[in-house]
Amino acid sequence: MIAEAPLALEKEFNPWLTAETRFNEAAEKLGLDDGMRKVLRSPAREICVHIPVMMDDGRIEVFTGYRVQHSIARGPAKGGIRFAPDVTLDEVRALSSWMTWKCAVVNIPFGGAKGGVICDPTILSAIELERITRRYTAEIIEFIGPERDVPAPDMNTDEQTMAWIMDTYSMHHRQTVTAVVTGKPVNLGGSRGRSEATGRGCLIVTLQALKRFGLEPSNTRVVIQGFGNVGGMAARLMARAGFKIISIIEYDGAVYNPHGIDVNALLKHRKETGSILNFAEAENMDRDEALFLECDVLLPAAKENVLHSQNASRIRARILCEGANGPTTAAADQILADRRIFVIPDILANAGGVTVSYFEWVQDRQGFFWNEQLVNGRLEEIMVNSFKDVTGYGEKHSVNNRTAAYMLALDRVAFAIKLRGIYA
Ligand code: GLU
């Protein structure tokens, strides 16, 4: 039995299997017919490229990249591109399907896609990263475009990466096409509020969840895993809203202060020292133990498979707000449900990013740009309504929030496919 455990865990950690389990459950509950299940389950298109890149020392290296377009039933495919050494096709597949469901949950007119390049950005120079980005873009160029597939930042990619993709695409098309990617710098057609949108979305849905527990930000203890674009921004915005951020967890350890951490001071400390550890106003803590601190809100905002069958029973949070994509394995879902933890599932909780990406795409196509107040106001409206849609659907059909979000999304996409019909 013991010898089988690692294999079982390996399976549990395959995001595509997690995605399938949740898909099957929602499809079953919706009573979707077999044909529709087949259409919705598989990605519509999977592109794999092997890209030669000249390295700084004159060597030629070949990198493997993927772009998976899960669905274009409701609009152009949409989703980020990640650079990481452990990217797999199954991971990109799962992430692409989550983008389809995410866009459907917040009801924006996009399908879903995801891209990934297997590389280690920590050992690449800026020039090497630029060459990888441009060659990857050139290899998938006929499959992307404002009406086809619109990439965005994800793990280890940022607005500079998006500027390179936009430029490469534009050079090939002999005109500047800003709407081909979102998450660009603001002075290159990016949207105000985009860089903080995912964190802001997490804040908005958490505030909605607090009402159900009679909590106010000032008496709400938050543990955040990840201090990057999503976690760092959520921490800042939540601290500003009066929440007590009692622990921040990073890859090299955690810091803890039961009275609340001064997030801006911690950001400054990390900038100066390269780590969140040894911060004067908090104590260092083991990163795994910090995940099990007693708190009101746990916000995993780093990567997949953080909560799983082996540790979910140790979580002592009332609300789980999934800032990352896929931080909980399917096997952990039931454990969290049995313990009555209020889950705000990833396809709702982190949808603020793609929602403001949608605003960016709209602004680029109109050539007319909104102020930050307008962006944030419209984001809030969409996130609050989507939270109500998901929780209302869950109550109506007696299912938990995650299943409700999947059912709502599958139903919307299936409806679009039925109306369009199957082209023969
Ligand atoms: N990578 C982000 C996500 O997973 C943003 C995607 C986008 O804006 O297209 O939601």
Image (cartoon, rainbow, N blue to C red):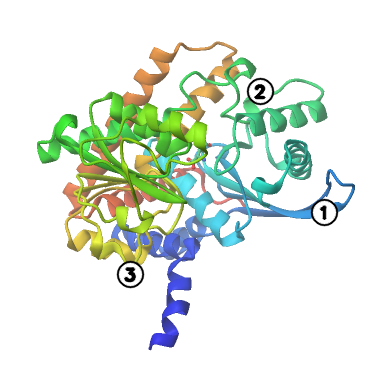
Q: Residues at badges 1 and 3 in contact (C-beta under 8 Å)?
A: no
User: Which circle's residue, 1 or 3, is located before the other in the chain?
Assistant: 1
Sequence-first disc among 2 and 3: 2
Is 136 situated above or below 311? above
Mark 1 vs mark 2: in front: 1
Q: Amino acid at mark 2?
A: Thr
Q: Amino acid at mark 1?
A: Glu
Q: In the shown orientation, is residue 229 left or right of residue 236?
A: right
Determine whether 316 is above or below 110 in the image. Answer: below
Q: Quadrant of residue 156?
A: top right
**Which residue: 31% across, 40% down?**
282
Quadrant of the snapshot with the N terminus: bottom left
Left or right of 59: which side holds 41?
left
Is residue 33 in sight in this rendering? yes
> Mark 3: which amino acid?
Gln
Q: Residue furthest right?
A: 58
Q: Which callout, 1 or 2, points at the residue further toward the start of the chain?
A: 1
10 Å crowding of disc 1: few (<14), some (14-19), many (20+): few
Q: Are marks 1 and 2 in contact (CB under 8 Å)?
A: no
Q: Respond yes or no on whether mark 3 lies under 8 Å from ligand 1.
A: no
Mark 2 sits on what residue? 178
**For the residues marked 2 and 3, what is the alpha-carbon distance in whole angstroms?**
45 Å
Residue situated in front as seen by the camera: 321 or 181 = 321
Cα distance, mark 1 to mark 3?
Answer: 39 Å
Quarter assignment of residue 131: top right
Q: Is mark 1 within 8 Å of ligand 1?
A: no
Residue where numbered disc 3 is placed: 310
Label drawn at residue 61: 1
Density class for disc 3 (Cα within 10 Å; few <14, some 14-19, many ≥20) is few
Query: At 24% from the left edge and 64% from the top edge, which residue is drawn?
Result: 313
